[in-house]
Amino acid sequence: MIETMKSITIAAPFSAREQMLLSLRDAGIVQIKEMRQSCEASSRITQKIHALMLNMNAISDEAGKSAAKMKQEKLGKKDFDELDERITSVCAEKKALEAERLSVSAEIGRVEPWGDFNPDEVRCLEKQGFSFSFYTLDERVLEQLREDESVKFIELKDVSRMKAVALVNSSLPHDVSAREFTLPAKSLSALRLRLGEIEKNITGCSSEIRSAAAYLDEYRLRIKELEQDAEFECARATSQEADGKICYISGFMPEESTDDFRSLCKENRWAYLIADVSDDENPPTKLKYKGLIRIIQPIYDILGTVPGYREYDISSWFLLFFSIFFAMIIGDAGYGLIFLIAAIVMNVRAKKCSDTNILLYVLSATTIIYGALTGTWFGSLSVLEKLPFLQVFIIPSICNYSMELYGIESVYAQNKVMQLCFILGAAQLGLACVINVIHKAKDKDLSLFGDIGWFIDVIVLYMMALYLVIGSEVNFTIVIAGVAAGFALVVIFGSQSPSESFAKGLKAGLGGFFTSFLDTVSCFSNIMSYIRLFAVGMASLAIAQSFNNMATMAGPVFGALIVILGTVLNIVMGLLSVVVHGVRLNLLEFSGQLGMEWTGYKYEPFRKTVQTEETKEGVTK
């Protein structure tokens, strides 16, 4: 359920602002309202965090996989600062060396075709009055130079299949095309010697950086401490000042923490105000899970979705339908066994059963059950033939091998599965209408009759979906009358509100006549949308059967590899389909019928995230 929140305000002497924030952080029950995301002080800390992360990433990159095996050591703050300063210096030195290596390597590549010579000897001749310029050109241009008596040059050894010349106290005529070669600063041998020195120095830098992998945990700890300090500075910047004597701060807290909050305020002699959340406030959402329902939290965390404070908590229904959708999309009991084995391995390795672990157990169980009911084990009929006891669990009318095992037409079995999808759709969307009716009945909200209208529409449009897709018989009089009655209820009562008159609500409903019509069409498409469960499940089965057929033609060794590859590929595609389709049906179709927009944000109180030994003006921070 969504816990009730309280709006609070605390006031304290301005001189005690630091102590007030530290005490609030230690208590960890108040989420500061409109917390500033950055300030000048937090920006400086963020820069330090960025610098630490750069060094930590450099160490991780150098150490590679060996970093995970390296025993971690602890450092005091002073020693850590000295280490980090040294790593910063070595990283900068390595970066400069790598840039020089590129430059020297490029210079070697440029000079190497000319051979190893000492450019200082050429410069010495230039000091004696001789000027030299070097060019590469083709044979035709060289003949042109030979004919020009004004140009004095020396022919050199060919360079990269081009003719090379050294002009002596001469300049190249403007109509002659050639590429000039500038003298290098050092000889080729000296450049190669320098490159070797650079490589040696880079290796030394890498070794020194790599050795710091023993302090990666210290880096992570320092980063967390700085992040905590940055949040503290933002909280300080958020607190308001009144006349330079009083400071105050506002926030939200769960109602169950009221007693602890009062005790904290009395202990510190703060003035405080506790009030109900007003309609114009947007408090955070704190979900309180009961029993097994808490295993839905990993999915919420992955999706990053949080219901709004005034919206419904549909965690139990989300978990129920998501488990069913997961089973139908994966659709294979064999794959369910793989998930079950993975869950057991995770459980054994972790030596405890986490919520994620339990969720995987539930999903694997539902997948095994559904796969067993449809007779699907690794997409192979031969499994059922070799293990006939598995046929005991099959429901013939939805079996994927109904023709081979029971002589039932495949089309009939497929139609039954599609009907099951539509039943799930109508049940989930109808449930949303019932939830709305119950909730609104408590508030004596007449718009509940609009939800009754939607419920009628869901039922008759479900009948229409069966008629259009699988050809079921339908009484069109009932369908038309049902849609008309439901539509009328939506238009008349859908915009009613306890705070407004019936006439005003009716006027708003009639004004949204066309929108209600489009919503009715959308309701039909939402029911049709559930057929994706059948389509994705059948696609997964077809892929598995295709790989199995290829495996039978490839021999035992390659056949086994093909089956393994096909299984892995199918499972990965199935999991992606669960995210795309299984989650969508809950977050869009079901939530949309409930009127939910998932606009909430998670309750994250101002609290300590890591213990530090630093002090701030004599107070432990």
Image (spheres, grey):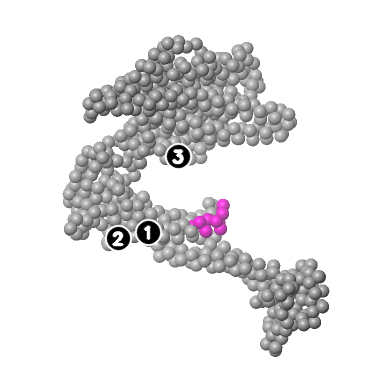
Magenta-drawn stretch contains 312: no
Is the C terminus in the top left, top right, bottom left or bottom right quadrant? bottom left
Magenta-drawn stretch contains 59: yes
* Residue underneath mark 1: 43
* Residue drawn at point x = 41 percent, y = 26 percent: 518
**Which mark, by number, is residue 603?**
none
* Residue underneath mark 3: 302
Horizontal side of 374 relative to 245 (left or right) equals right
Horizontal side of 601 relative to 213 (left or right) equals left
Q: Disc 1 vs disc 3: Cβ atoms closer than 8 Å?
A: no
Q: Which residues are magenta?
A: 56-66
Q: Residues within 10 Å of mark 3 (few under 14, many from 20)?
A: few
* Residue drawn at point x = 34 percent, y = 31 percent: 312
The location of residue 575, given as percent across then percent down, is 53, 34
**Which mark, by number, is residue 616?**
2
**Residue 79, picture quadrant:** bottom left
Q: CA distance from mark 2 to mark 1?
A: 18 Å
**Element type at marker 3?**
helix
